[in-house]
Image (spheres, rainbow, N blue to C red):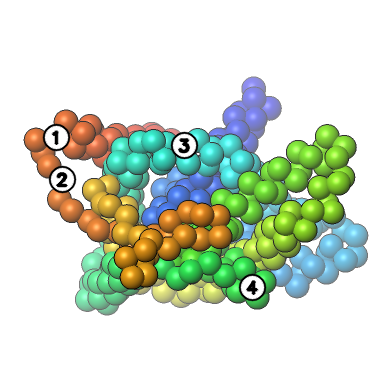
Amino acid sequence: MQRERTFIQKTFLFLKGLAMGAANKVPGVSGGTVSFVFGFYEELIYSFRKVNFIAFKLLINGRFKSFYRYVNGQFLLLIMGGSIFSYFSISLVLDFFLENYELYVWSWFFGLIIGSIYYIGKDFGDWNRNNILSLIIGASIGIGISFLTPATENDNLWFVFICGIIGVSGMTLPGLSGSFILILMGNYVLLLVDSVNELFHIMTRLLSGDFKVLSDPIKIRYLKIISVFTFGSAFGLVSISHVLGYVLKRWNQIVNAVIIGFITGSLGIVWPWKNAVFLSDKGNIQLDKKGNKIIENYQRFMPDFNNSETWIAVFYICIGIGLILAIDYYGRQKK
C-alpha cells in the first residue's frame, strides 16, 4: 500500500512537471503560475537554492547520494523531467491546438489565469497600503509588458545565453511569461520551436545510428544554440531562485502581492479576442529566416456576442476557471 501511494505521488509530481513545461512554452502563460496553483512553488525555489557551493563540493568529492538528498533530487528529477518531456510531447499538442483552435486555447488560458488570481489571493490576508501598492506595481508592469513591440531574431550566442536567463524567469516568477519575453526579444521561434525540433531530429537520427547528422553545419548551429540556451536557463534558474528565496523569506506578503499583480496584468497578454499585427516595411510584411511572418504586436478587440464562437470561447473560459476551483477543492479536502 505504501509503495503504491509513493508511486501515485511520483506520477502526480511528474504530471505537474508536464503542465509546468507546457505552460512555459505558451506565450502569455507562466510555468511559475502553474507551480503556484499546484502548490509546489516554494519547494521548487527551495530545491533550486540547494544547488550551491555545498552541493558542488559534494559532487566533486563523489558523494553522489548525499548530493542527491541535499538538492532534493527526486523532486527536481520528476518536475524537471516532466517539464523537458513536455517540450517534445504535450507542447506539440498545444502547438497543434494553437494553430487550429487559437481562440478556444487562449480562452482556456484566460480562464486558468482568472482562477489562479482567485486561488492565490483568497488566503492572502492583510491588504494594507504597502501590499496594495505592490499589487498595483506588479499589475502595471504586467500590462506594460503586454504592449511592448517584439524585436527581430538574433542568434548571437551571448544574446542566446541572456535569453536563457530571462526566458526561464517564467518558471520562477508566477505571472511573468518567459516565452512571451522571448517573443519580445525576437527569439521565441528560434529557441522554443526551431531549435527544439532540430534537437529532436538530431537525437532520433543518432539513436538510429546515423552519425552523419553531426557533419551538417545547420544542425550543429542549432545544437550550439540550444546548448547555450539550456546553460543560460540552468544558470538563470539557480541564480533567480536564490534571489527569490531571500526576498520571499524577508518580504513574503509584498512579493506575493507583486506576483498577484503580475498575473492580473498578464490577462492582457492572453486576452482571447485579438489579431496579430505583423511587422512591415513600406507595406511589405517582414519574414524571419524561416519564412514566417514576424509578429509586431496584437490588436485586441471586444467579442461579438451574436457569434456562436464567442459563447464557445466563454465556455472554455469557464472550464479554465472550473479547473482551478476543482484543484482548490481537492487541496482543501486533503487537509
To which residue does mark 2 refer? 303
To which residue does mark 1 refer? 307
C-alpha gap between disc 4 and disc 1? 46 Å
Q: Position of residue 129 (x, y in %)?
A: 22, 76
C-alpha gap between disc 3 and disc 4? 29 Å
SS class of the residue under badge 1?
A: loop
Are there few (<14), some (14-19), or many (20+) residues within 10 Å of tag 2? some
In the picture, the quarter occupied by the C terminus is top left
Q: Earlier in the sequence, mark 4 or mark 2?
A: 4
Residue found farthest to the left = 306
SS class of the residue under badge 4?
A: loop
Cβ–Cβ under 8 Å for marks 1 and 2 = yes
Residue found farthest to the top = 1
SS class of the residue under badge 2?
A: loop
Are there few (<14), some (14-19), or many (20+) residues within 10 Å of tag 4? few
Q: Say whether residue 322 is visible.
A: no
Q: Nearer the viewer, residue 34 or 52?
A: 34
Position of 247 relative to 125 (above/below): below
Q: Nearer the viewer, residue 189 or 261?
A: 189
In the shown orientation, is residue 60 left or right of residue 132?
Answer: right
- Residue at image position (65%, 30%) is 7
Are there few (<14), some (14-19), or many (20+) residues within 10 Å of tag 1? few
- Residue at image position (74%, 54%) is 219
C-alpha gap between disc 4 and disc 2? 41 Å
To which residue does mark 3 refer? 96
Q: Position of residue 269 (x, y in %)?
A: 32, 58
Position of 325 relative to 249 (above/below): above
In the picture, the quarter occupied by the N terminus is top right
To which residue does mark 4 refer? 156
Q: Which mark is residue 315?
A: none
Which is in the foreground here, disc 4 or disc 2? 4
| Residue type, label 1 | Asn
